[in-house]
Image (spheres, rainbow, N blue to C red):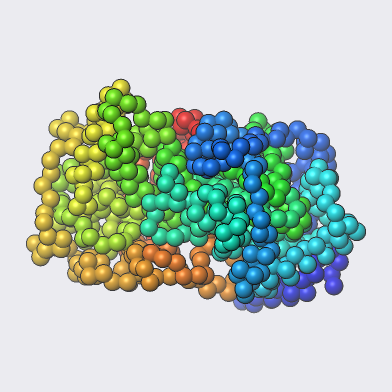
Amino acid sequence: MVEGLPCSSMVITEKIVAIKSRELKRMEGQTDHDVVPIRDNFLKRKIEKFDLDDLEWIEKIPECMVFRPSREEFEDPIEYLEKIAPLASCHGICKIVSPIRASVPAGIVLMREKPGFKFTTRVQPLRLSEWSEDDQVSFFMNGRKYTFRDFEKMANKEFTRRYSSTCSLPEKYIEEEFWNEICSGKTQSVEYACDIDGSAFSSSLLDQLANSKWNLKTLSRLPKSTLRHTSAAIPGVTDPMLYIGMLFSMFAWHVEDHYLYSINYHHCGASKTWYGVPGHAASEFERVVRDKVYTHDIMPVDQPNAVFDVLLGKTTMFPPNLLLDHGVPVFKAVQKPGEFVITFPGAYHAGFSHGFNCGEAVNFALSQWFPMGNICRDRYALLRKTPLIPHEELLCKEALFLSHERLQTSSSNNEWDSSSEKCIDVFVQFMRSQHYARWLHVNTGARLLYKSDIQATIYCGICRRDCYVSHFMCSCSLDPICLDHGVDVNCSCADRIVFVRRDIKDLEAISMSFEARAAKRTEQFCFLSATCDETYQPYCEMSVGIDNVSTDAHRSLSTSNIKMYLQVCNGFKAGESPNINFADNESSVVQESDDSDVEVFRVKRRSTTSIENRSIDEAIVSDLPENQVFKRLKKALDHGFIPDESFIEVKPPPSPVNEFQVASYEINESRSNDDFSSIEWG
């Protein structure tokens, strides 16, 4: 057995040998000039950019806020979280000590209530990286499956081998040990079971916590949680996932998908140390990572969104003293069994385990999340990243809910609460921009038709945004195109069709009512009209055709476009038409087969279990002609359809573009790309 490796070291070592063997075979036939040397993924050496000789900075990191709700306050988690959010979000993370505990241990749930429960771990190199072209960290798939009890035995045995004790050790001592080990210790790797489908909350009616609203299996779909509007189960977002760790297993610096909130419950085992950076300091965090962590050969200084893209890989770990040294606020939490940790929108966080433990996490969103969700949605679009949740759909459904609730429970003279106002502002701006975009299309010869009443998520072929309210199609592309890209004046198509929802007039009526009933905020929307054509009138009438796919409507569309949309209207299954996700009660999400041992997980994994509703498919590339993708992205900026939060200017590459180069454009800052200062946090 190799000294310093866990008990499963033989399996890990064999995996490493196999990986190196494949790399050698891959390099065969290449000249020395072609081969870029890659450092051993487990080899440690001192990284000068990270100063860990003195660990006094550990005591300089302040603790985050800790809340201890009473049983009465604990009744409604969404109401309680809304109450503490304005204060707690200033630290990025906070800790909530539950007044009630689970009466059925997680181990019993996973071994008895879930017979046959097994999971596969990831192997994490326990070292720092230069983050250069020839030195980056990847997490390997171990290939070995564990039962809950087997993993616990392995993790405890490794802890005992290292410290000759089974007792928990002082938190500060373990924190110092972690950073010493990751810098220059002998242990090469640890195992971490992350993103495991399932929950350790018991189904027993006698378990108080499991039968409360804080059960993570139901929290994301509570009445006031925005994610209740999703028609599909999304593992790790709407449905919880398990995280089973051992000594020094870590979660690298990352931000939640779509800048959502997250709630994490510690079921059992050793403590976890969390580091959190408040959302208002996210831009400063990314600048430090770009300038002080990543080298320019993998992170060009003129591509500010590239740092966000690399961080999505969730393998970037570095000591938080680097942030403190550059004025970025960092807060810490030590989470113990029976405690919740909340992360707030836009807050980067990282941490590690003090020994064997089991946690569980899920995302949720409040109405006040929509401004942050918009920012993240635009960043995903610029990277051409397929979203996990249908942002437009959530926004419209929440607005419908707020309108209905207002009519049922309040008089017109009452003020909106601050959380609802944020949703309303985003919705009104969205509906106005959508209306103006349709008006531009109509004025340039496009025709309006109602969408077919299909239960599907349609994604833009250029930027991957979801197109819930409307999209247009023409002969330039097989894929639907969202209206954020404006009108392409260079389009030579004889006929363009803009498809809109059948309830579009209802949505616009709600938007107008929001403006009328909030007269003091109407002035905030005036700037939208100021940027429009002087002949344009907000919410002006535009006639919409009756037939979904009439012969006249598609007279000038390409045959492939007609065939594709007819397939949509005829209810083809998921995956048979480009950029369409269907709602299908019998559909299932299947984990994609991947034989690579150096797989880097970028977002929540695909589930291996069947779920209800539609599947979450991977992006399907657009069939646009060369440089057409660039032209439409650029036009989106010129027409102002990408909000100012994106703050970038896109320049075309010197050579023709293919569909895989869309995220590699040269991007320059016209002003700070990540300036969140205009957002009201919490």
Picture coordinates of residue 585, whole percent (x, y): 36, 68
Picture coordinates of residue 163, whole percent (x, y): 88, 56
Residue at (83% x, 45% y) in the render: 170
Picture coordinates of residue 20, whole percent (x, y): 69, 72
Q: Quadrant of residue 195?
A: bottom right
Which residue of the protein is positioned furthest toward the right in this rendering? 164
Residue at (52% x, 33% y) in the render: 83
Which residue of the protein is positioned furthest toward the front in this rendering? 206
Residue at (55% x, 50% y) in the render: 212
Picture coordinates of residue 197, whole percent (x, y): 56, 64
Residue at (42% x, 34% y) in the render: 419
Q: Nearer the viewer, residue 620 or 416?
A: 416
Quick check: 288 left or right of 352? left
Q: Nearer the viewer, residue 545 or 294?
A: 545
Q: Quadrant of the N terminus?
A: bottom right
Quick check: 442 left or right of 437? left
Q: Nearer the viewer, residue 603 or 43?
A: 603
Q: Is residue 670 above or below residue 605?
A: above
Q: Nearer the viewer, residue 237 or 445?
A: 237
